[in-house]
Image (spheres, helix red, strand yellow):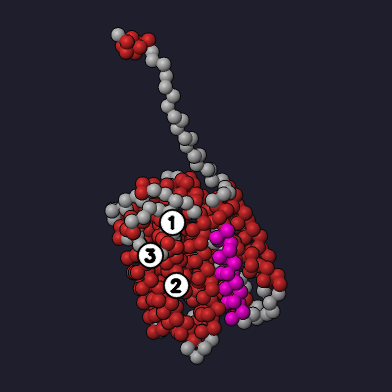
Amino acid sequence: MTTRTARIHPAWWVAAVTFLALVGAAAFRAVPGVLIDPLRAEYGWSVSTISAAVAVNMALYGLTAPFAAALMERFGIRRVVVGALLLTAVGSGLTVFMTASWQLVLLWGFAVGLGTGSMALSLVATVTGRWFVARRGLVSGILTAGGATGQLVFLPVVAAVAQTSGGWRAASLGTTAAALAVVPLVAWLLRDRPRDVGAVPYGGTAADDVDPVRTGAARTALRGLAEAARSRPFWLLAAGFLICGASTNGLVQPHFIPAAHDHGMPVTTAASLLAVVGIFDIAGTVFSGWLTDRVDPRVLLLAYYALRGFSLFLLPPLFGPDLHVSMIAFIVFYGLDWVATVPPTLALCREHFGARAPVVFGWVFASHQIGSALAAFGGGVIRDVTGSYDLAWFGAGALCLVAAALSMSIRRRPVPPETPPAVPTEPTTASAATTHG
């Protein structure tokens, strides 16, 4: 090992391969929004029917997260991530043989939802909690950007492939191959704990590398929920994150492309716009992680949600067959704000729940995906009933303002003061007599 290599802490290698795993898995998250129109054209399914499969996927993506965090405690990060990548690859690959809508729900809804849920933000919480003491906010921002950005950057690729002779089936198999390509890297480089490579957490000591929990995964996850549910901050964080999911993954991600297409914009152009969201999401989320180490997380959440809400109010008039500067401005802003909420939310979870934060954050993230599922299905219903997505955009904007208010109502947990050093005192008369007697 060279001197230069030796200076790199193993935690950064673990973070790097985790980033790649999240990007690889993100390919699966990119497909539904692009394939709504092709599936409607081939099978005659309504937007509501296809949105139902997307909703199941998003709900399971979130509900799996707390159990995945507990499984990582029980069996290790590497085994869980490898298994999750294989499950999602199988679920995606088998969609090329489907002939009925229930098969779409089974494969893309259940199989891919369970697999990608096992690599959700609970993986970010587990890796940062085990491997980092310093720079946790920054690393959580980088890893979160990997997952969210990957799924958006894949969009123009998937859209372009879907336009070829292979159609949506070629796109589905391509995403399968992308995730399978990451499996060898995870098996080779991902390690469960610093002690496995004779190291300590970055910026910490051996005492920070706590022993893993050996109880059952379900018991650990449910116990974490039961304990967290008695805390007011948990419900405020969960409610805010539910709205976060509804206004991003649930509404914008699957329905932006069909909404733009309704106004005459080509699918590939709309997909490219969402890819731009992914590009700016990297900067926004990493910067948010940096800010989280320095600014009150509640203030950050207030700003993120409020600005997101106002931007959604302005979105409907921006749609049209031609691309205007105002739409590009919206895309850039939404990219910066897309998952910027994650680092401050995770920081508040750590502040209030300590060592239980990964599992508790898994449940907070589950609420995020429940919101995503409701918005994904609700957006499709609104489109089928009213013939437009406008009501969905306005409703999501109003909810974001509610999330801003909820975030500021979370009380900070006071940092316990340092214990002052003991000051020697003069012996009492009795003790002095005993000493000198």
Dot label at residue 24: 2
* Amino acid type at image mark 1: Thr
The image shows residue 237 at horizontal and vertical percentages of 50, 52
The reply to whether residue 44 is visible in this rendering is no
* Residue under numbered circle 3: 1
The image shows residue 409 at horizontal and vertical percentages of 56, 46
Residue positioned 45% across, 32% down in the render: 419
| Secondary structure mainly formed by the magenta segment | helix
Q: Tags 2 and 1 in contact by the CB under 8 Å rule?
A: no
* Amino acid type at image mark 3: Met
Marks 1 and 3, how far apart at CA: 25 Å
For label 1, count other residues whose C-alpha is less than 10 Å away and answer few (under 14), some (14-19) or many (20+): many
Determine the image quadrant of residue 379: bottom right
Q: Which residues are magenta?
A: 268-287
- Residue 83 relative to residue 411: left or right: left
* Residue under numbered circle 1: 128
Residue positioned 30% across, 60% down in the render: 75
User: Is 111 in front, or is 27?
Assistant: 27
Q: Is residue 198 above or below residue 251?
A: above
